[in-house]
Amino acid sequence: MATSTETPSETDTGAKRRFRPYQIALVIGGGFAAITAASYVAEQLWAEHWAETYAEEQPISRLMFNNIPGWLRLSFYVLVVGAILYGAFNFSNRVRNWERGGPDDRRTKPKNVKKRLENMRSGLYMQTLLRDPAAGVMHSFIYFSFLVLLAITTIGEINLQLPVALKFLHGDVYRAYAFIADLAGVFFVVGLIWAVVRRYVQKPYRIRIKTKADHAIGLGVLLAIGVTGFIAEGFRIALEGMPEGDNLAFIGYPLAHALKGMGGLEWWHRTWWIVHILSFIAFLVVLPTTMLRHMFTSPINMYLKDRDRPKGAMKAMPNLMETELETFGASVVEDFTWKQLLDTDACTMCGRCTSVCPASGTGKPLDPREIVLKTGEVMAATGDPQVSPPIALDGEITIGANSLFERITPEEVWACTSCKACDEICPVNIEILDKILDMRRYLTLMESNFPTELGSAYQGMENQGNPWAMPQSDRAKWADKVDGIKILEGGDPLEAEYLYWVGCAGSFDDKNQKVTQAVAKLLQRAEVSFAILGPSEQCTGDPARRSGNEYIFQMLAMQNIETLDSMGVKKIIAQCPHCFNTISNEYPQLGGHYEVIHHTELLERLIDEGSIDMSGTNFAERIVYHDSCYLGRHNDIYMAPRNIIASIGGVEVVEAPRNGTDGMCCGAGGARMWMEEHTGKQINVERSQELLATGATRIATACPFCYVMIDDGVKGEGVDEDAVKVGDIALHLLEALEEAETPVGLPLSAVTNPV
């Protein structure tokens, strides 16, 4: 699956038939079963004789299968082989369901293999999970200990098969082997008990609401493996007369001391060995049909994180004016890619996505985890063959068709702010936002089922070139208050180094016009060569694309690309993170390739170079920065805004509780700037209260939408501008510079053309 870009229906006539992914799963499972069966054959032919000779020569060693009669050994191998084949068959059925999805190029290539390995290593090392230390350490105890115990078992089996001269588990090596086995077992059992307490005693809300029988089965089987392993070990050591080589087995050896006086040690050891083996076989049986499957699917998903488009870009679509496709977006399972369907089986149901979702946290109908699980439910119920759902369904839920909207409502889809917090925190790299945006495409393009408020924005973008439906002739009016702004006509050659892309908000919104003026003045101070398009600039199309209207996006994007290319534009300064993301990451899908820099990145560089001199500033303010989702999580730009603030002399920089990758959305992304919030608490109010609680006297933003939303939220709390001033970083920076240049005793208002 990891290397295929074809759907199951795609074949090459006359070409050599390739294995289908589900067949590969069967082959892998069959291979493990064959190795297991071969181990038994080898034991019967030579290994048992070698083991007895070895035990005589090396007293500090271990005789495998001691006290286990031949018929029981045969039963063990037969059952394990059967369980492996059963599990492989069930797992292959799940893979066949993923194959229902469309193509997605996730091939491993020379240029991405390093990144793939880094992604997988990051996931396996639980770097995302460890943001929540308790959960991260708990999972680490279970996961890494399980791997060590699996390795211990495998090493013991290998040592059994080797000739006497090559066996290595004796003396100090065996002592270390016994010690590591017990150490891993302790961590394994402690981690599992911790998990049980967390799920069934502490019961955090995000875990409690999804706790099903699957979890009890999984935890119970794993805990049975760990506990019965120690008991069986204790009886074995007691039965063998407390051999010296096991004295470092710090759990089994003391336990054996307590058990050695019991009668019937042979029977007790054999009984607990059987229970231990049956626990392991039960684990193999339930592995593909319960949430335990994520032990395999999650690492695969982590490995496949890297894709052929930038982090902030939506999936490309064909030219809608030329395509012959009959449907757009996603409405049925088959409309998703195979990777999006794999996501549903990789989900651990941990609820971290839900815990950081601004919509879910403020009472909206969206729950990101439910988007994944409901997709998986529809896939499982409508597959051929049918498989178990990602997690057990309530009895009254029925699924009659493969439509995603059997389980997912439009209200859930439209509540999303596209902040990407769910994707960023997912410990197994599930791509939730893509699913939501694909469903929006279907609702908008195929059913015209979108919030009524978006109709005006669509009309404005289509007819006036901006979602506010303002006259294009007004785009450059802000420049009347700043001298020396060069305004180009579309098609004029750009002779300046940069084109300053102001954006719709920076051109038409009263608050953000001041930001535009401040940025222009700062660029002039630094003697940066730039020009603007003015009326020839149109909306980049981000609100249209994020709300599913690919038609309007492509119309605007193609017009903008034609304008930019005709002018010979190479470098662009973007004031809005949404414009920055769209031009930088999505215009290349349509042939527009430019070097785009956000204004905070450029200002940071100008300060570092000394082109903007901060040495005289002394701003006695307490400032908190609000992270823009499209600057941060979509493009990983976190430090440039903070470095600008820190460069201002005298400031005290504070952080909100949710910041950086964990920052909270303002509520305006995903075209929600043009939609009303009818349910729950307003997201911008929630975020504004959090920022005010820091005690900051200034709140800095780096996005025009954030500026509007946070400013409205702060004022809605009854806090006026004299107490807490909200503004883009450019506003705070320019004010600090102008204050430093103001003669002592002269008010700032006396400075020429202040912002």
Image: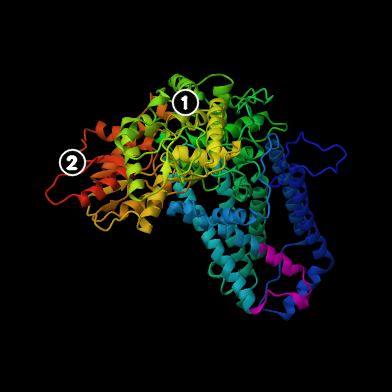
x, y (%) of residue 739?
Answer: 21, 49
Q: Sequence order check: which comes first, mark 2 or mark 1?
A: 1
Question: 311 or 46: nearer the eye?
Answer: 311
Q: Residue placed at 72% from the left, 31% from the top?
A: 384
Q: Residue at x 42, y 22 (%)?
A: 469
Displayed quadrant of residue 275 = bottom right
Q: Position of residue 261 (x, y in %)?
A: 57, 69
Give the numbered dot on residue 465: 1
At which x and y percent is residue 209?
Answer: 46, 36
**Image quarter in which the N terminus is found:** top right
Residue at x 78%, y 61% (from the top left corner): 39
Q: In the drawing, does residue 748 fall left or right of residue 255?
A: left
Q: Nearer the viewer, residue 59 or 644?
A: 644
Give the prevailing secondary structure in the magenta stretch.
helix
Which of the image's four quarters has the C terminus?
Answer: top left
Q: Would you identify the image quadrant in which residue 675 lies? A: top left
Amino acid on which the number 2 mark rests in the picture: Ser
SS for dot 1 = loop
> Residue 475: x and y, percent?
39, 29
- In magenta segment, residue 163: yes
Nearer the observer, 283 or 714: 714
Residue 121 against residue 52 in the figure, above or below: above
Residue stretch in magenta: 153-171
Query: In the rendered structure, which amino acid carries the disc numbered 1?
Result: Gly
User: Label 2 belongs to which residue?
Assistant: 749
- Circle 2 SS class: helix
CA distance separating discs 2 and 1: 36 Å
